[in-house]
Image (cartoon, grey):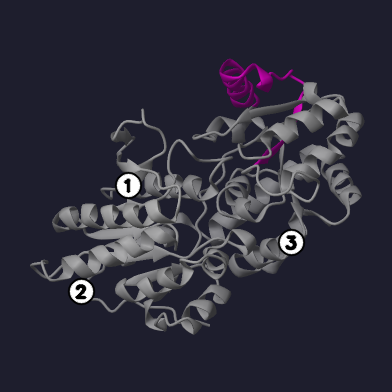
Amino acid sequence: MFVARHFWPHCSGRHEAAAATFELTQRLANWGMRVEVVTPRHGNTWPTEIMLGDVKVHRVASAPRGDWSTQRYVRHLSHWLVERMPRLDAIVCDQLREESRAVSMAIESGASDTHGDHPTVGVSVCGGWGEDSDQTWCQNTRGGKRVLQSCNGLNSVITEHAKTDRYLVSHGVPAEKLRRRPIGFHRPAAVTEQQRNDARRSLRGINLDLTTDLESRVLLWCGPMSGPASSDSGVGALVQSARFLAARDQDLRIWILGDGKIRDWVHTELKAEGVRSVVAIPGSFSDMTEVWQSVDAVVQNEDSQLRSTFPAALAAALPIIIADRPAARDYLQTHFDPSILDSLAWYDPAKPSTLRKAFRSVWGDLEMAKQHAFELARDLSRRHPLEQELAFWQSILRPNPNQNLPSPKAS
């Protein structure tokens, strides 16, 4: 059972953590595991149960909107989990947030009622990078201390890098509970011209803003439209440069996928710049398959994009224009060989002109950039196969009592 504050349809372009959890649960279900998800309702008309492929989704209560309603939701979620624990092998919280307390409370409450040799395993994921990380959330919110304390009631806390390990240990989380999560990539498949045209035709049928010509070349930005209504935000940096990029290539189309508080500002700024006709703002997507088949390159300049959009773009073998931010370098240096750093088009987010320069370096020979991206994706699938990720989750969710599994310690 996965526990998530946000899930389908709040995925790519709105909640990157939800997109990552959706992808993970679908993958685990395809690997033969029975997977369910519990999440709140974010609308009164939302059904309480749905099926997404082989994954059953429970929507148990209205989404909390404040401190008081959050505490009530945590208690309700904990009781709901306890009632279902006899049939659950594991409960996994997809972020180290308030829901982790509900999982910890459920594990502790249900321990005395558990019979047999296989008690339910309680797990939380402490993920994210930079300003979007769960570590930053714990540091900056009033409930962060309680959430960290709840880790003691869990069997494992899944982390992604050494900085998180050190932070958790320094706040009382036992090092033996920490498990470092590997990242896995599938083998890339080249997108044929027919597949690209079919995907673009399908997207045009969904939203006329996504209309393209045969000669069109599409640059994608996908993420939550948050942050300041200026060029200091990720989407704002692209908006500021859109007029210059469009002037260099008459066939350029820019797709800005996402929702958030500055969406109206983005629309107004693009209209004022006179480039609204070449920029599409279609909202968020729950399934990005056809989007990845349709676009030619991706801009990555928000820490939140490191949860889902960035690894998905790498797996899709697309050229990436990336802001040189500490979180992005930490992500790449933690997971990959340093040589990958030279395979991306970097720019300095403090200097808008460098974004345009990075764009020119990719667009100047786009076919060569795509070939390099495909070779990179193929190399990543060899060095980081999906099988190692499957083995990791099996060791977490279906541990063999007779086998001593390795448990990476904090660095």
Q: Is residue 209 left or right of residue 244?
A: left
| Residue indicated by mark 2 | 401
| Residue indicated by mark 1 | 37
| Residue indicated by mark 3 | 325
Q: Nearer the viewer, mark 2 or mark 1?
A: 1
Asked whether the viewer can see residue 392, the reply is no
Q: Is residue 276 left or right of residue 250?
A: left
Q: Residue at x 84, y 43 (%)?
A: 359
Mark 2 neighbour class, 10 Å CA radius: few under 14, some 14 to 19, many 20 or more: few
Mark 1 neighbour class, 10 Å CA radius: few under 14, some 14 to 19, many 20 or more: many
Indicate yes or no whether the magenta region holds residue 383. no
Residue 12: x and y, percent? 55, 40
**With respect to residue 242, does 227 lie above or below?**
below
Q: Is residue 314 left or right of residue 121?
A: right
Residue 240: x and y, percent? 84, 40
Q: Quadrant of residue 101?
A: bottom left
Report the magenta residues as a range: 193-222
Q: Are marks 2 and 1 in contact (CB under 8 Å)?
A: no
Give the camera-side residue of 101 and 186: 101
Kind of residue indicated by mark 2? Pro
Kind of residue indicated by mark 3? Arg
Q: Residue at x 45, y 47 (%)?
A: 65
Q: Quadrant of residue 58?
A: top left
Asked whether the viewer can see residue 71, the reply is yes
**With respect to residue 408, does 83 lie above or below?**
above
